[in-house]
Amino acid sequence: MFAWLLSGCVSQEVRIVDLTPPEQLGRVQAESELLDIGIAIFDPNVPEDYDEQIKQIIQPDIRRAEANYMPYFTKNLLQSTGNWGAVRVVPRPTHAVDVSVTGKILHSDGESMEVALTVVDATGKRWFTKSYEGLASKYAYDEGIPPGIDPFQTIYRDFADDLLKYRRELSAEAVQTIRATAEMKFAQEFAPDAFSDHIGETSRGEFELKRLPAEDDPMLARVRRIREREYLFIDTLDAYYENFQRDMYPAYQNWRRATYAEAIALKELRAQSRARAIGGVVAIAGSVAAMSESNSRYVDTSAIVGIMSGAMLLKSAITKRNEARIHAEVLEEVGVAAEAEIMPHTIELENQSVRLQGSVDEQYDELRGILRRIYFADLDLPDPDADQTVADPDQPPNTTQQ
């Protein structure tokens, strides 16, 4: 009677390691056609409530490490296509790039992953927001799989193909507008007085290019030099993310390999627990109803048997939930074991060993403050934030001279 509730809880799927490369534009682009992309560190999406973290089996430090790892892997895949200009990982969206990618991790373990990705260009136009999800194959964790292949390769490839699809629809004029708008927004950030009337914002929150400065404008030349230094800084930071990915990869891959079987077992146990609980409640309710509507001793006896069967199903469901809790604890333990190995510590910058502390945003602010002081000094200009950032101009905080 209740067999349908207990069978087919989790379907068996054939999973393969998909090595299909992303699409390519199919033609060589001029440098003026190439759009630079900045991929911001993903939102790790860690609940503040500890009980909710336990419920979702989220290890905060692991998730925050993934928020660094995923953008860098995305960057490498996009760069390999040749469809774009410079593709860089940035701590947060910046006016130094033409197209910004932001992401949020919705779910991640060794068995399944889901991320939401948003693409916006410098004009403020949103290309798309889309959720990508995938299931890993156990063969993706074999020792012979190279680091350049991710267990969730299809997610990154599908995103790269969607990005290219939108790029193909842009006219040459639209591309030039995006590039010019990005430059003017950057100029407005550092020299608002000189470039305040070059760009405006529409009621829809998009940016409208009103006019361009002359190519020989000395203020434009100065801003471009500052922008080049910003690129140097982002490239330095990009190298930092590369080192971080290389250092974390073995531990992270081991964590995902270990969580693969546990995640599948947990999913199956939860499905079985839910089905058995429903079956137990239905059995008890149906049997009680039969007893109340009948004077037959046979029906009463059958109803009692039904109640007992329903109670057994409920007991089985509770047992399954306890087993599921054990698997959840195993996932947490694996995450704790990997934490110490995958957190970044230092970065080399301008002959200084800079120790990074706090969140990614705090690390970015600290590094950018050091860079601002360097390039304003080179331009013989006062740093407008000097009285807010560094008290001692000869020694920035948390650094040691080499």
Image (cartoon, rainbow, N blue to C red):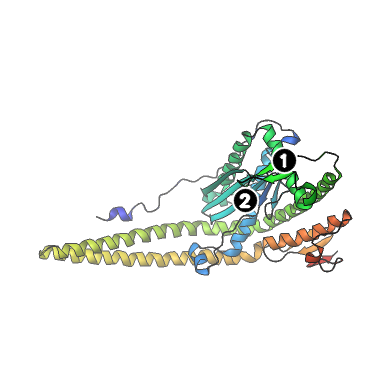
Point out the residue furthest to the top here. 27
Give the answer, above or below, for where 365 lies relative to 103: below
Q: Which tag, 2 or 1, sits closer to the chain's start?
A: 2
- Judging by the rendered image, the residue that carries numbered circle 1 is 210
Q: Secondary structure at mark 1?
A: loop
- Judging by the rendered image, the residue that carries numbered circle 2 is 102
Quadrant of image for the C terminus: bottom right
| Place of residue 37 in the rendered image (x, y in percent of width and height, measured from the top left) | 68, 45
Which quadrant holds residue 338? Answer: bottom right
Residue 200 left/right relative to 12: right
Which residue is found at the position 60% from the left and 52% from the top?
103
**Of the pair 41 and 187, the residue shown nearer to us:** 187
| Place of residue 211 in the rendered image (x, y in percent of width and height, measured from the top left) | 75, 39
**Of the pair 14 and 205, the residue shown nearer to us:** 205
What kind of residue is marked 1? Lys
| Place of residue 129 in the rendered image (x, y in percent of width and height, measured from the top left) | 56, 46
Point out the residue furthest to the right here. 380
Q: Does residue 232 appear in the picture of this structure?
A: no
Residue 42 left/right relative to 30: left
